[in-house]
Each structure stands twice: as C-alpha cells, then as structure tokens.
Amino acid sequence: MSDNSSTTPITCPKCNSQNCFKNGFIHGRNQRYHCRNCSFNFTDKTDINYKDPKTKPEELKKLALKLYLKGNSYRDIEDI
Ligand SMILES: [Zn+2]
C-alpha cells in the first residue's frame, strides 16, 4: 500500500465530503482545510476533537469509524 500524504483525500468532519482543499496553516503548524461543499474550515486536529452539539451520536460513530479506517493517513498528516 502506497501512503502518500500529499494525495490523501481530506474528508470534511462536518459533511464528510472529500471536496476539500488546503487553506493555509493555523499557528504556523496545523494544516488548515476548507470544505467546498459546506464552506467549513477545519484542521487535521479538528476532525478528532470536533464536537458539534447538533451532531448526532450516530454520525459521530460513523466519523470515528472513518477516522479509524484512515488512521495511518492522519498520522502522516500530524507528523508534518
Ligand atoms: Zn463540509
């Protein structure tokens, strides 16, 4: 399995769309992303710590599973 972080699809933590692009850095360290689908701004830390009171537990479970399945990729991003 090739693991190139530059081609890893970024998933929006809010709408799960992969129509996201890099949008600079926060604090000069954390990669920031912008979702074209819902205009949500997030970082590679956001999807792990992101908690929306409006988000249903089921959606959180799905998100957690998704993050688990692509855990390796996310680790690569965090190491940058
Ligand atoms: Zn989105």
Image (cartoon, rainbow, N blue to C red):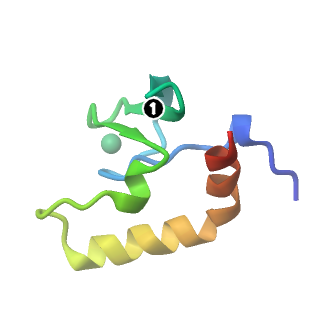
30 versus 51 height, above or below:
above
Question: Which residue is most to the front?
Answer: 27
Amino acid type of the residue that numbered disc 1 sits on in the rendered structure: Arg
Residue 13 lies, in percent from the top left, at 37, 52
Q: Quadrant of the C terminus?
A: top right
For the point 44% across and 72% down, the residue is 64
Q: Where's residue 44, x and y in %?
A: 49, 46
Q: Quadrant of residue 77?
A: top right
Q: Quadrant of residue 35?
A: top left
Of residue 65 and residue 44, the one placed in the foreground of this image is 44
Query: Does residue 20 appear anywhere in the picture?
Result: no
Please give the count of numbered marks on the rendered protein. Answer: 1
Res 35 seen here: yes
Q: Position of residue 6 (x, y in %)?
A: 71, 34
Q: Quadrant of the N terminus?
A: bottom right
Percent position of residue 18, x then y: 48, 43
From the image, tell me which residue sits under label 1. 32
Residue at x-position 40% and y-position 46%: 12
Q: Residue furthest right?
A: 1
Along the viewing direction, whichever of 44 and 39 lies nearer the viewer: 44
